[in-house]
Amino acid sequence: MDAVILIGIQASGKTSFYRERFFDTHVRISLDMLRTRHREASLMQACLDMRQPFVVDNTNPTAADRKRYILIARDHGFRVVGYYFQSRIDDCRRRNERRAPGHVFPDRGLRGTHSRLVLPGRGEGFDEIFYVEMTPQGFKVSEWSDEV
């Protein structure tokens, strides 16, 4: 069973990637949707108990943010896979501005998340990590190197 953790600032393509790659196979766990940590924990526990693959679709900018998911998933025998999304602030700002009304994230928050963003590493407990870029042709996924 896979526990997938998406990593990147707002408007870096995480939710679109989830829809394209995991919608039919993995439950989406997202604070944007669930609104509270209690609901998030409840849904994740249900996935763990039922051995259901899931994707954590949050920004997860720091190792501490990711640790909460990695530890519990590994404790339940899940394989943990990270996807780090290229998070160029100007590109994300442009995509954010094109979002539907009510879904635009405040620029100050976007910059704040970007300032906290820390590259992931295998030492955090990931079994695999991938690097995701948005290109005109779609998502380009590459193997991660901790030397990035």
Image (cartoon, rainbow, N blue to C red):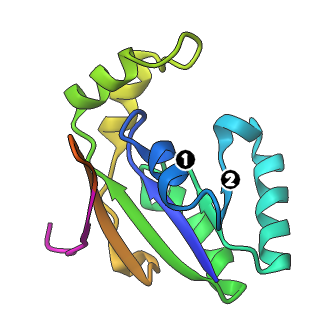
> Which x, y percent locates residue 109?
44, 24
The magenta segment is 140-148
Q: How many marks?
A: 2
In the image, is residue 92 above or below residue 72?
above
Identify the residue shown where x is 67% and y is 73%: 53
Category of crowding for the residue at label 1, using alpha-carbon neighbours closer than 10 angstroms: few (below 14), some (14–19), many (at least 20):
many
> Which x, y percent locates residue 37?
75, 46
Q: Amino acid at mark 1?
A: Asn
> In terms of secondary structure, where does tag 2 sit?
strand
In the image, is residue 107 above or below residue 71?
above
Is residue 141 rendered magenta in the image?
yes
Q: Quadrant of the C terminus?
A: bottom left
Relative depth, front residue between 53 and 10: 53
Q: Quadrant of the N terminus?
A: bottom right
> In terms of secondary structure, where does tag 1 sit?
loop
Identify the residue shown where x is 81% and y is 58%: 43
Give the labeled residue for mark 2: 29
Q: Please say if the residues under marks 2 and 1 sit with CB atoms less than 8 Å apart.
A: yes
Q: Amino acid at mark 2?
A: Ile
Give the labeled residue for mark 1: 58
In primary-sequence order, the first of circles 2 and 1 is 2
Category of crowding for the residue at label 2, using alpha-carbon neighbours closer than 10 angstroms: few (below 14), some (14–19), many (at least 20):
many
The residue sitting at the top extreme is: 101
Question: Left or right: 112 with respect to 46?
Answer: left
